């Protein structure tokens, strides 16, 4: 291809890429409700049809100044497509075809096979018929969905579209002498007349030439089922080749041809999802705006979300920072750093008495949870008791108790261990073991409720009785 061809190809490619990118970028903030993931977007198609060197826009080609001068043969044309739908408006399609293009010049002018006009008599020697074999043609097309007939339905049954693309065509033109105007005489290859120009000279091991082309077309699809659609269309193909049909006295411009096709398109993916090609966002919007039941359901959901958000905000609010939310805080505004229980109220721990002996009465000896080890704060009380017992040679009874955690048997043994711990301290302080009576009563005789930690602390004790 020359510089002009390269420039035109680059411009066309940039146009298709820009259109595709713009719509794909728009689809990132979904152009369909719920996004593309809820739809089927891939499809493959099989198509077949006919070709003609004419185009509906008119004009001429290499074998006549006016299209109306042709009594054209039609060539076969068939292929397949692979398409990705990016939104309900736009998709990209890879199309491949092969077949042939035929033309028959009704005019009396002709050439001798070398591109030189020798006579105006159509019976004279010259090439008046051409067949161009299309070895293959491949293009990347942007497909634009134009509208639908059933525009108030969730899925369209009829869908119109337009497409434009850029491709490469491999072709091989062959000229014939038109010995029989009616075309009743064919060679053994099914061609009419005598071949006078033959296949082009091979280039290396390739017997065809390449040219760029731009397909522009219109079509309509009919939905037959959730998987299959009937696809009908018409495409004009504008090539970058003056000699698409071989050398000719009219080869002064870029050549074109058209193809009319029909085929079936198969949508891929789960049938549980809608086909994006036939999806109708207008109908979805209509349902949301006009369907009372759907609108009421949406409003109810909004109200539930609003209520839930308010509840979450309330549950998370902790004004005094004590770790208990305001909804459950029974003692709001507690000072910072205060140790609180599950209801947000300060925990009251028993304060140790400065004087453990009041009026000859000894306060109980306290213990930690699940422990029979004496606290150091009990030493002063036991030292006074030991001195009194040594001086008076009196006796003392030690009654051990436990709070209600654990089994009764375990707590009974624990209470005995606590009483014996106090006895051993007194013996070590010089009190005769025979004057000390140590007993364990487990969970019996609680002096406070075992339902609170404050009460359980008081029940973990050894009482001193003289």
Image (cartoon, rainbow, N blue to C red):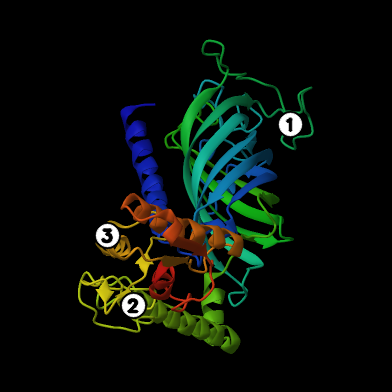
Label 1 or label 2, whichever comes before in sequence order: 1
Q: Nearer the viewer, residue 249 or 214?
A: 214
Q: Nearer the viewer, residue 317 or 42?
A: 317
Left or right of 13 in this view: 292: right
Residue 336 falls in which quadrant of the image? Answer: bottom left
Tag on residue 383? 3
Q: Nearer the viewer, residue 44 or 192?
A: 44
Q: Alpha carbon of mark 1 to alpha carbon of mark 3: how far?
A: 141 Å
Where residue 51 sits in the image (x, y, percent)? 64, 42
Q: Tag 1, which secondary structure?
A: loop
Left or right of 378 in this view: 56: right
Residue 232 falls in which quadrant of the image? Answer: bottom right
Q: Alpha carbon of mark 1 to alpha carbon of mark 2: how far?
A: 109 Å
Q: Which residue is mark 1?
A: 180
Q: Mark 3 vs mark 2: give the one in front.
A: 3
Q: Tag 3, which secondary structure?
A: helix
């Amino acid at each position: 291809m020359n510089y002009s061809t390269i420039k035109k190809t680059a411009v066309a490619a940039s146009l298709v890429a820009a259109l595709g990118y713009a719509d794909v970028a728009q689809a990132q903030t979904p152009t369909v409700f719920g996004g593309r993931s809820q739809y089927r977007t891939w499809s493959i198609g099989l198509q077949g049809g006919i070709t003609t060197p004419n185009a509906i826009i008119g004009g001429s080609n290499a074998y006549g100044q006016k299209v109306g001068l042709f009594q054209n043969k039609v060539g076969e044309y068939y292929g397949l497509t692979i398409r990705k739908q990016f939104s309900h408006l736009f998709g990209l399609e890879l199309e491949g075809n092969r077949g042939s293009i035929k033309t028959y010049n009704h005019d009396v002018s002709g050439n001798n096979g070398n591109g030189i006009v020798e006579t105006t008599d159509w019976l004279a020697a010259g090439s008046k018929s051409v067949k161009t074999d299309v070895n293959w043609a491949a293009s990347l097309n942007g497909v634009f969905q134009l509208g639908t007939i059933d525009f108030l339905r969730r899925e369209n049954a009829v869908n119109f579209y337009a497409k434009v693309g850029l491709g490469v065509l491999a072709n091989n033109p062959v000229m014939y002498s038109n010995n029989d105007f009616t075309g009743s005489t064919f060679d053994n290859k099914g061609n009419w007349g005598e071949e006078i120009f033959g296949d082009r000279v091979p280039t290396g091991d390739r017997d065809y030439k390449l040219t760029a082309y731009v397909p522009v077309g219109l079509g309509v699809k009919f939905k037959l089922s959730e998987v299959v659609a009937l696809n009908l269309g018409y495409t004009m193909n504008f090539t970058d080749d003056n000699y698409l049909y071989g050398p000719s006295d009219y080869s002064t411009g870029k050549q074109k041809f058209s193809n009319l096709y029909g085929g079936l398109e198969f949508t891929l993916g789960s049938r549980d999802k809608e086909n994006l090609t036939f999806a109708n966002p207008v109908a979805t919007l209509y349902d949301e705006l006009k369907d009372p039941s759907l609108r009421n359901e949406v409003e109810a959901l909004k109200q539930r979300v609003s209520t839930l958000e308010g509840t979450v905000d309330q549950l998370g609010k902790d004004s005094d920072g004590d770790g208990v939310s305001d909804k459950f805080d029974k003692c709001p505004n507690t000072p910072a750093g205060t140790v609180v229980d599950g209801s947000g109220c300060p925990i009251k721990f028993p304060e140790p008495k400065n004087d453990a002996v009041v009026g000859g009465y000894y306060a109980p000896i306290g213990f930690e949870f699940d422990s029979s080890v004496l606290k150091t704060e009990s030493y002063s009380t036991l030292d006074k008791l030991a001195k009194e017992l040594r001086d008076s040679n009196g006796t003392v009874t030690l009654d051990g108790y436990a709070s209600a955690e654990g089994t009764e048997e375990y707590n009974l043994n624990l209470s005995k261990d606590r009483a014996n711990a106090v006895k051993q301290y007194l013996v070590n302080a010089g009190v005769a073991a025979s004057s000390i009576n140590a007993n364990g009563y487990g969970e019996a005789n609680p002096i406070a409720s075992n339902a609170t930690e404050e009460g359980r602390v008081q029940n973990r004790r050894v009482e001193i009785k003289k």
